[in-house]
Amino acid sequence: MTDTFSCDVSIVIPIYNEEENLPDLVARVGEAMEPSGFSFELICVDDGSKDDSARVLRDLAARTDWLKPRYLMRNYGQTAALQAGFDGVQGRYTVTLDGDLQNDPLDIPALIRTLESRSDINMISGWRKERQDAAINRKIPSMIANRIIAKVTGVRLHDYGCALKAYRTELVRRIRLYGELHRFIPVLAFEAGAKIMEVPVRHHARTKGVSKYGIDRTFRVILDLLLMKFMLRYLHRPLHAFGGAGLWMGVPGLLICGYLSVLKLFGESIGGRPLLLLGIMLVLMGAQLIGLGLLGEILIRIYHEPEGRAQYRLRPPPED
Ligand code: UDP
Ligand code: MG
């Protein structure tokens, strides 16, 4: 992890089956960035596309010196693709957007200038004030999801889902994406101590290719959110979560069993007492929960090993 940057801006774009969009995308990034005066690189991460995206990328990169593609072994999903891009950034600032031209690269220079002038802000999240997607299966579920996320996490944004975001690269290096967490980057960033600002950005309808997601995503978002809330709270100390509950059960259980043992010692019959059943159950459940907490601690250790958290594997450029 180095703090020397070789350019001003690294633009990261996850790519899955966007062969028709890639030439325009790369051209538009160039048109937006070249006159801006910022030095930049474009890291397009091919997420195991089934179409010709990888080859198209390779050919574009052969004649575009700022285009640095990365190719994943298979389709790992948008989150892993983003992380693969993050792991390669060399710029002082990192920008993400989608590969389908719904976000407008022309917004990038202004976001970077805002980050430059506001040293108190670590991250800017785009806000699709005029979102160009179908209302019924996209905008309305998102609106509900945004409200829930804001409520549950306490990070108040209008639009978590906008892919167009700009970061100081130091922040990018402090967060680690896994599972489906790309949707909650602002929350992860907030947990990492970042100050986040929301800025309205342009948004266009997708004209080529198809969206990779449907309405079932909203439900998965809610499940992920609950999981994340739990993880953020207990990620580092599962023993505290499970072990605490284990002690609350195990200790009364032991007391009950101890009490019954004393009665037994003094010759009383303890058979047929519901209390006996309760005592034994509490001891067993408590022991299991503590065991689960210990197991969690081991998992956390493994998770923090660099090997254990590799979310993807790279492959060389396609040969033809
Ligand atoms: N994407 C990806 N891997 C996937 C699915 C999507 O890298 O498994 C990319 C996709 O190419 C696009 C971005 O993630 O650049 C967002 O996907 P899409 O436009 O389909 O999502 P939507 O805008 O409909 O939410
Ligand atoms: Mg899209």
Image (cartoon, helix red, strand yellow):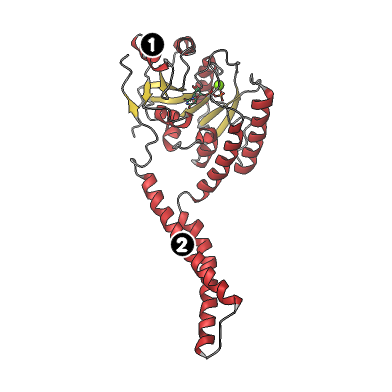
Type of the residue with mark 2: Ile
Residue located 33% across and 11% down the image: 62
- Please tell me how crowded label 1 is: few (under 14), some (14-19), or many (20+) other residues with Cα within 10 Å: some
Task: Work out whether residue 217 or residue 276 is closer to the camera in this orientation and state it.
Answer: 276
Residue at image mark 2: 290
Residue located 65% across and 23% down the image: 129
Question: Which labelled disc corresponds to residue 226?
Answer: none
Quadrant of the image containing the N terminus: top left
x then y, percent, for residue 205: 60, 16
Residue at image mark 1: 60
- Vertical comparison of 233 with 205: above or below: below
Alpha carbons under labels 2 and 1: distance apart: 55 Å
Quadrant of the image containing the C terminus: top left
Q: How many marks?
A: 2
Whether label 1 lies within 8 Å of ligand 1 gets the answer no
- Please tell me how crowded label 2 is: few (under 14), some (14-19), or many (20+) other residues with Cα within 10 Å: many
x then y, percent, for residue 98: 51, 21
Disc 2 to disc 1: CB gap under 8 Å:
no
From the viewer's perspective, tell me whether residue 157 is left or right of residue 100: right
In the picture, residue 6 is in which quadrant? top left
- Vertical comparison of 71 with 245: above or below: above
- Helix, strand or loop at label 1? It is helix
Residue with the most extreme front position: 272
In the picture, residue 80 is in which quadrant? top left
Query: Between disc 2 and disc 1, whose residue precedes?
Result: 1
Type of the residue with mark 1: Leu
Residue located 52% across and 30% down the image: 123
x then y, percent, for residue 92: 41, 26
